[in-house]
Image: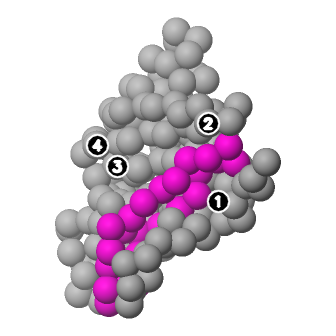
Amino acid sequence: MFQAAFLEGGRETYALFMSDINHDTITEIVEISKFHGREHRLLWDIFKIAHHCSYLSIGPDKGEDETEPVPEVEWLFETHVRERHIIMSTSKSMPYKGSAEDDDVQPPHRQAGAYYKRVARTSDGSFKVTMDLPTAASPKPTKIEITSRGASLLSVSATAAVASVISTPARAG
């Protein structure tokens, strides 16, 4: 895990970048941070989820439609999230229920994606998959801009390599 804080125009933006770790390791990170009184280090606006959207980064069981998080993962995602956040899965597209990809043991797992989507929906954020941006048929590199208003996902046109900001830009002057 890598944690970074960016300061732009008086507002800090926090990012957590998880690697290929499972829920046990995330549990240890949360427990150690709490033990040392450093829960604030786990606040986040941008969360690069672990292991390409594997259910094992959330809990031990995939679940039928949504992976149920272990308590520490739930705490991290549901209490330390900040407004207008971005949850990013560096993975191929989420499989459809009943598809051959859905039966694959390799991530991404639809059930894990469902958990992250619910978190985003209930906490004024967004869940994005890198290989779906700007479209699944024509993915392009993903960029996130950090300004005084926080983090904004930049979209790249599928037909032209021109970037545009999805959220409202800050006023000049």
Q: Tell me which corner region of the image, top left, top right, bottom left or bottom right, holds residue 82.
A: top right
Q: Position of residue 171 (x, y in %)?
A: 77, 55
The answer to whether marks 3 and 2 mark residues whose Cβ atoms lie closer than 8 Å is no
Q: Secondary structure at mark 1?
A: loop
- The amino acid type found where label 2 is placed reads Glu
Q: Secondary structure at mark 4?
A: loop
Residue range in magenta is 127-153
Q: Earlier in the sequence, mark 3 or mark 1?
A: 3
Q: Which mark is residue 50?
A: 3
- Marks 3 and 1, Cα distance to the nearest angstrom? 18 Å
- Marks 4 and 1, Cα distance to the nearest angstrom? 21 Å
The answer to whether marks 3 and 1 mark residues whose Cβ atoms lie closer than 8 Å is no
Residue 95 higher or lower than 68, as above or below: below
Q: Which mark is residue 125?
A: 1
- The amino acid type found where label 4 is placed reads Ser
Mark in the foreground, 3 or 1: 1
Foreground pick, 83 / 164: 164
Residue 117 higher or lower than 97, as above or below: above
Question: Is-magenta flag for residue 150?
Answer: yes
Q: Secondary structure at mark 3?
A: helix
The residue that mark 4 highlights is 19
The answer to whether marks 2 and 4 mark residues whose Cβ atoms lie closer than 8 Å is no
Q: Earlier in the sequence, mark 3 or mark 2?
A: 2
- Marks 2 and 1, Cα distance to the nearest angstrom? 20 Å
The residue that mark 2 highlights is 8
**Can the viewer see residue 119?**
no
Mark in the foreground, 2 or 4: 2
